[in-house]
Structures are given as C-alpha cells and as structure tokens.
Image (cartoon, helix red, strand yellow):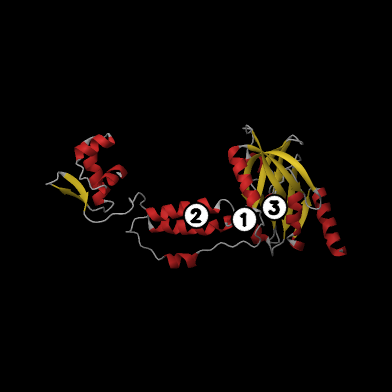
Amino acid sequence: MLRIHQALQEEGYPNANRLAADVEVSTKTIHRDIDFMRDRLNLPVAFDPRRNGYYYQGKVGNFPSLQITEGEVFALVVAEKALQQYRGTSFEKPLLSAIRKMQQALPDTITVNLAHMEQAVSFRTRVEPILDLAIFDVLTRAVAAREELDLSYRKPGQSSEARRVDPYHLANINGEWYLFAYDHARKDIRTFAPARIQSARPTGTHFKRNHKFSLEQRLRDSFGVLSGQGQFAVRIQFNSRTADFIREKKWHESQELKELPDGGVELRLKLSSLAEIERWVLSWGGNARVIQPPELAESVRQAARNILES
C-alpha cells in the first residue's frame, strides 16, 4: 500500500495492471489494497476512466501507516514523560526522534485532548545522577560496538586508578546508571558507576562478549547491583507503623512475608551480599529490626552507634 501511495503521489495515473507489475502481486491484491486505503484509511483514492488510472482527489501528506486508539495515544504520552529520566543522556535524541516519527504517522482522525493528558500523569525523581555526557556517550558506543575501553576510575574516598575493561552492558537500576564490564586486571566482571569514571578512551580493540553473561542471573541474589559469593537467609521484622509499606512492594524476587500478631510483618530474603541491605534497613530507622543473620544485625547496630557518636 505504501508503494501504491507513492505511485499515486507521482500523479502518473497508474492502473491495477501497472501497479501489480511494479509491486509483483496480483491485480486482485491491488484492488483489495486500494479498497482498504479508501475505506479504512480514509484516503481520497479515485479512478479516472478517461486516463484509465487511479489518483488522489486532493492533497495527501504522509501515508497513515499507523492506526492508533485514544488509549494508545495516552500510553505514548506517558512513555514520553517517562523519558525524562534519560534527559541529557545520549539516549535522549534518538528516543525523541522516534516519538516524533510516530506522532507524524498518526492519522488525522484521532482527536484527543493532549492538554488533559499532560496534566494527568507525571514522573518525579528525588535524586538525579550527575553524568559527564561525553563519557556516557563513549560508554554507550563502546557497549554497542564491543570495543575495549581504558578507564580512569575513582572509588568513593580513593584516588583514581587505570582500568582496562570490556564493556558488556549499561543498565538503569532504580534510577541509577551502571556499567557492567569485564575487568582485565581482576579477570572478572565488575560494576562501575559512570558518575565515577574520570575518563574513558576506546583502545581500538574489539572483544567477543561472553555469552554466559546474564544481567538477570548476576543480579538475581543481590538487593540492588552488588552481588557476592555468600548465601544469606535474611529476616527483618517491621512494626505495624511501617508494615503496610513493606506489603505494598515487591522488594526482591526471593521475598516471603510473614504476618506478625502485633500487626507487623517479617520480610524474608535470600541474598548473596549484605552491603546494600544494611543501608536499606538503616533507612527505616527504629521501625525495622534484623532477626538474622547475626552479622547483619551487628553491622546495623554498629552503624547506629556511629550515627549517635558522630
């Protein structure tokens, strides 16, 4: 149908036989497609007996290749708002370009109040990561091209150090960006925060990605992005003041909830590392109590002492 549309735009008055030969289909298919264009897409296709060919009665712009409902338009608006987390990154331009192309392809027969939609939904993030866009662009290109990188990387509270890596994957997890890459010196996959990368330079050497790498598998037993080699059965009890907040979310794939007699709830998890769960427990203040493992309970207790003594 797009080929038919283009032929009609050229105003050559093509007939069914000529169109069938050009598109390499039967004349019956041409007649059926033209009927669809006229009846379903509302295109002003007409037949001129004198010239024995089809033409457009009036001006026609882009071919309406996208049929969409009001609900789908609303979903598109929501998706555009969700793109706010990518503002300023190298993903912003191609994502907005894709949305503009979809908007241009929308049929004129769909009319909705976009102003109302704009006011109905919004996305907010409390903390926005600060990224060096030039470095972030180098990372995205290297991941796509499977090209080694020389990084200058600084861990919190430490000096920068040189790291040569094979960048496997960029992920946005809970609003934060992370690079998962094979570290040549450590001979293992490491997680890097792009905000801590001081510089990134492609080496010109390409690598074959390890097909055994799976982000889902790697993060399966972590509470965020940090995975470890341990196996911890975690039990945390929340009092009745905060129990509903725990019930309302899925915090981890392994989670189990046990209702407590006083209206509280016990959250049970299976994790490979305790580093992130410790910070999370502390964020609940005195409303959470670690039951097990003992080392998590002690680390939370010590962190609370440090807060009081500081």
Q: Distance between the residues labelled 2 and 1?
A: 31 Å
In the rendered image, is residue 271 in sight?
Answer: no
* Amino acid identity at mark 2: Leu
Q: In which quarter of the image is the N terminus?
A: top left
Residue 54 position within the rendered picture, expressed as x and y whole percent measured from the top left: 20, 46
**Residue 198 disc label:** none
Q: Which residue is drawn at 46% across and 54% down?
A: 99
Report the residue marked by disc 1: 249
Q: Nearer the viewer, mark 2 or mark 1?
A: 2
Report the residue marked by disc 2: 96
Q: Residues within 10 Å of mark 1 (few under 14, many from 20)?
A: few
Q: Which of 246 and 213 is in front in this view?
A: 213
What kind of element bears circle 1? loop
Q: Quadrant of the C terminus?
A: bottom right
What kind of element bears circle 2? helix
What kind of element bears circle 3? helix
Q: Nearer the viewer, residue 198 or 112?
A: 198
**Residue 195 disc label:** 3
| Count of marks placed on residues | 3
Q: Which of 84 and 2 is in front in this view?
A: 2
* Amino acid identity at mark 1: Lys
* Amino acid identity at mark 3: Ala
